[in-house]
């Protein structure tokens, strides 16, 4: 499978929407952090959103990731992870309380899992080419 086969047929809509939302919310929270006394909570949430927007852009274009269904699983893990991580920090900043205990660490763990899954999908693709 060549790179053009992997990145063909146009973008998938859901990860593309998630990429746009990550950028939009990340920039918005960054601005809010600059002008807010709770900026110390908002800044890491903004940075995580902006840092993960390219992951969703990649997933919107990636086709045929191995194993089958990897792109959907990675998209879901990263999306839930970002909601928990950025959502928990934002809730503490704007509402004065957490989403629930350990929401941010759980979200961070899901983000680590999503990135590890990208690496494993890449290794699986390399193994398929050699096999």
Image (spheres, rainbow, N blue to C red):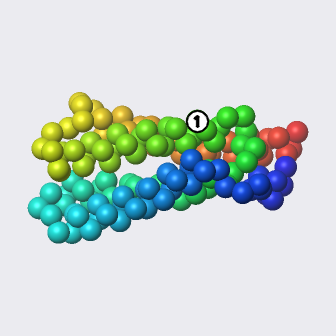
Residue 112: x %, y % from top left: 47, 42
Residue sitting nearer the eye, 92 or 67:
92
Residue 19: x %, y % from top left: 51, 56
* Helix, strand or loop at mark 1: helix
Task: Name the residue: 67% across, 42% down.
Answer: 121
Residue 116: x %, y % from top left: 56, 42
Task: Name the residue: 40% across, 55% down.
Answer: 49
Q: Can residue 73 be seen in this view?
A: yes
Task: Name the residue: 30% across, 56% down.
Answer: 44
84 left or right, relative to 98: right
Task: Name the residue: 23% across, 30% down.
Answer: 101
- Residue at numbered disc 1: 73
35 left or right, relative to 21: left
53 left or right, relative to 95: right
Q: Can residue 112 be seen in this view?
A: no
Q: Which residue lies furthest to the right in this view?
A: 131
Asked which quadrant contains residue 75, the reply is top right
Dividing the image into 4 quarters, which one contains the C terminus? top right
Q: How crowded is mark 1: few (under 14 residues within 10 Å), some or many (20 or more)?
A: few
Residue 31: x %, y % from top left: 26, 68
């Amino acid at each position: 499978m060549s790179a053009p086969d992997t990145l063909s047929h146009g973008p998938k809509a859901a990860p593309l929407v998630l990429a746009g939302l990550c950028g939009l919310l990340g920039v918005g929270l960054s601005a809010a952090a600059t002008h807010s006394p709770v900026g110390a909570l908002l800044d890491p949430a903004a940075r995580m959103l902006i840092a993960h927007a390219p992951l969703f852009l990649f997933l919107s274009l990636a086709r045929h990731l191995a194993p089958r269904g990897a792109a959907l699983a990675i998209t879901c893990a990263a999306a839930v992870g970002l909601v928990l991580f950025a959502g928990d920090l934002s809730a503490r900043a704007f509402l004065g309380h957490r989403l629930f205990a350990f929401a941010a660490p759980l979200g961070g763990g899901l983000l680590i899992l999503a990135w590890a899954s990208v690496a494993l999908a890449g290794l699986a693709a390399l193994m398929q080419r050699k096999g």
